[in-house]
């Protein structure tokens, strides 16, 4: 695998589309994706994998059926596999995701919010 | 898996030992570890896994046999499996590592710099 230095802020500055994660790095068969998000996503579940959210900028709310988790910059949260969740952000937030390659942003839910990740 | 919000800076503030990675989160069978490093580590190789370095604070130099990679805060680099490397930091740096659970800090090299990661 070819590898080079990755500047997270530069990667996030390189696109504007919201709710469309970009691949910025790969570790074995896992990917780190960068995303800009604003507003409310959809409730969904990943049946086969945990999903890590790390906030770079702004505030991310992860809605869970038993309450919200609110994350600021430098905070992270792992949604366990099988746990329904809905990411949301009142104003635009910049986040990283860490999960196996091939994990769909809409999980088992699918639908028109689904985006194939592309390289940043 | 029980999960809760993880504040990266708080985790790093919770210990002082250098070159002794602390587990701060788990995603499936991968772990995120936080480490404080200063000075030069040892040359080593991970034969079976890539290793991600992400700098939180300070400057990390990853020595490779064909040159150094120098990383500042918000920058990351993936050392591919099988590639010999030696992390170093002139002044203390705070970093995150992402790799499969069970990855030894000294890789295939072993020796007295080996540390079993403990939870932060």
Image: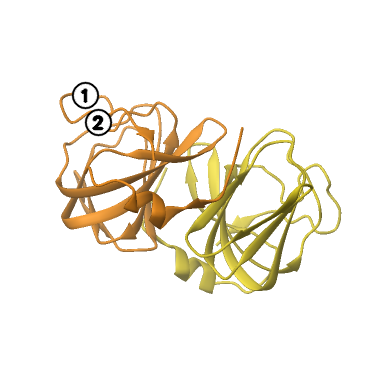
Chain colours: A yellow, B orange
Q: Could you tell whether B11 is left or right of B61 in the image?
A: right
Element type at marker 1?
Answer: loop
The N terminus of chain B appears in which quarter of the rendering?
top right
Q: Which residue is mark 1?
A: B110
Residue beneath label 2, please?
B106
Local SS, label 2: loop
Residue A93 location (% of width, % of height)? 61, 69
Q: Can you say which quadrant of the picture contains the C terminus of chain B? A: top left
Q: Give the quadrant of residue A21.
A: bottom right
Residue at (52, 74) in percent of width and height: A13
Q: Nearer the viewer, residue A116 or A97?
A: A97
Between A90 and B44, the one lying in front of the other is: A90
Q: Is residue A81 above or below residue B88?
A: above
Instruction: Write down the chain letter for disc 1.
Output: B
Label 2: chain? B
Which residue is found at the position 27% from the left and 32% from the top?
Answer: B45
């Amino acid at each position: 695998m070819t590898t080079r230095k990755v500047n997270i802020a530069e990667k996030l500055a390189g696109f504007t589309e919201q709710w469309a994660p970009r691949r910025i790095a790969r570790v074995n068969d896992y990917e780190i994706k960068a995303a800009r998000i604003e507003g409310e996503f959809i409730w969904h579940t990943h049946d086969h994998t945990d999903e890590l959210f790390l906030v770079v900028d702004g505030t991310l709310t992860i809605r869970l059926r038993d309450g919200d988790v609110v994350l600021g910059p430098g905070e992270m949260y792992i949604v366990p596999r099988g746990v329904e969740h809905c990411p949301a952000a009142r104003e635009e937030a910049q986040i990283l995701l860490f999960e196996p390659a091939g994990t769909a942003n809409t999980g088992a839910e699918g639908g028109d919010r689904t985006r194939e990740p592309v390289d940043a």
